[in-house]
Amino acid sequence: MNYKESLFFVAKCLTISLEEKNRNEIENQLKTEEIDWDAVVKLSTAHYVFPALYCNLKRAGFLHFLPEELVNYMIHITDLNRDRNTQIIIQAKAVHQLLVQNNITPIFLKGTGNLLEGLYDDISERMVGDIDFIVAKKDYEKSYELLQNNNYNKVTDEGYSFPQFKHQPRLIHKDRIAAVEVHKELLLEKYALEFNYNLIKADSQIINGMNVMSFKNQLSLSIIAKQINDGGIHYKNIALRNAYDVFLLSKKTPVINAFDHFETLKNPLNCFAASCHIVFGSVQSLKYEKTKETEAYLSKFLNDLKHQERTKKEYVKIDRKLFIKTRLNIIKKSLFNKEYRQWLMNRTSDKNWQREKLIQLRIKKTKS
């Protein structure tokens, strides 16, 4: 199985609990074809959907098609993730209680929000990093201080922090499993006026006693996290963890016309939805608005899947371009913004940072 075949196989497996056509296709493939399980494990792990893959194969009754050793490994990893997510849910509820007691209403985001609302049949399906939540700007600083006053500390021990537009520096608690990020914005500065706290607060919902976004906004944020915040629109690739969330949310609110209220965000979101639609096997709930932009995006997306070595080289160029653009933006902001100027001065005079840069340069020279 090449990369494209592995991607489409794993993606379809993620839908077999809810899509009968895909279930039948995967069953036939398991019965008649030699599956490269090493490639499947490698891809599903890289995309953070390994537990979700196991859960869907288990629900479909397909585990007997897999090597026994692989099934045992999948059970082990899924159990570990279930235990972790159980602790994350407990931690998020404690954070929620702390904030509510101080008259602050947090809205939980992304993976943690999905877990709290019960989006998944099994909480082990979603691999979660941090606990993210957003609050009103008037409660932003207070929320951060409350956590710090309750034994949450900054992840980094640097005496200075990068001026964050979206959220405060991550906090950790020595007796808790996940880091916490307090947001005042959801998006990069360029798009913040289109998708922000006021917009999601207007139709937020309470599920299981917790504040989460509407399903429509959850759908948008699942894509935004990849396309905008992680630069996916430049790479024209897919992240199955985000895509799986989009698939599940599309069962609650169809994708078609879901982004009509956006202006600059509409095309990037619609393009990702288009790639989800094709990778998951033309699922009806993922039907998207076809435009010249989406068809051009899909053409590049599919072509890149066929030529992975060339695509990897292109990614290196994109990485470099985005890095330079980011650094130039920081320098530009430092001319007018005291916070950025102070950070830049601290950073460039930091001996540890200078040492890291020298090591990186030596590594590059060695490789070349």
Image (tube, rainbow, N blue to C red):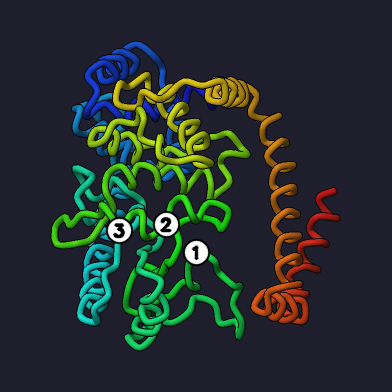
Residue at 64% x, 29% y: name it. 308
Instruction: Please state the horizontal and vertical placement of residue 239, each as a whole percent of the image.
Output: 47, 39
Residue 10 left/right relative to 57: right
Q: Residues within 10 Å of mark 3 (few under 14, many from 20)?
A: some
Quadrant in which residue 175 is drawn: bottom left
- Secondary structure, mark 2, is loop
Farthest residue to the left: give it.
208
Which amino acid, by three-letter code, is at mark 3? Answer: Lys
Which amino acid, by three-letter code, is at mark 2? Answer: Asn
Which amino acid, by three-letter code, is at mark 1? Answer: Lys
Pick whichever of labels 1 and 3 is earlier in the sequence. Answer: 1
Quadrant in which residue 343 is drawn: bottom right
Q: CA distance from mark 2 to mark 1?
A: 10 Å
Identify residue for label 1: 166
Identify residue for label 2: 196
Mark number, residue 201? 3
Q: Nearer the viewer, residue 33 or 120?
A: 120
Residue 349 left/right relative to 175: right
Residue at 29% x, 48% y: name it. 78
Residue at 72% x, 36% y: name it. 313
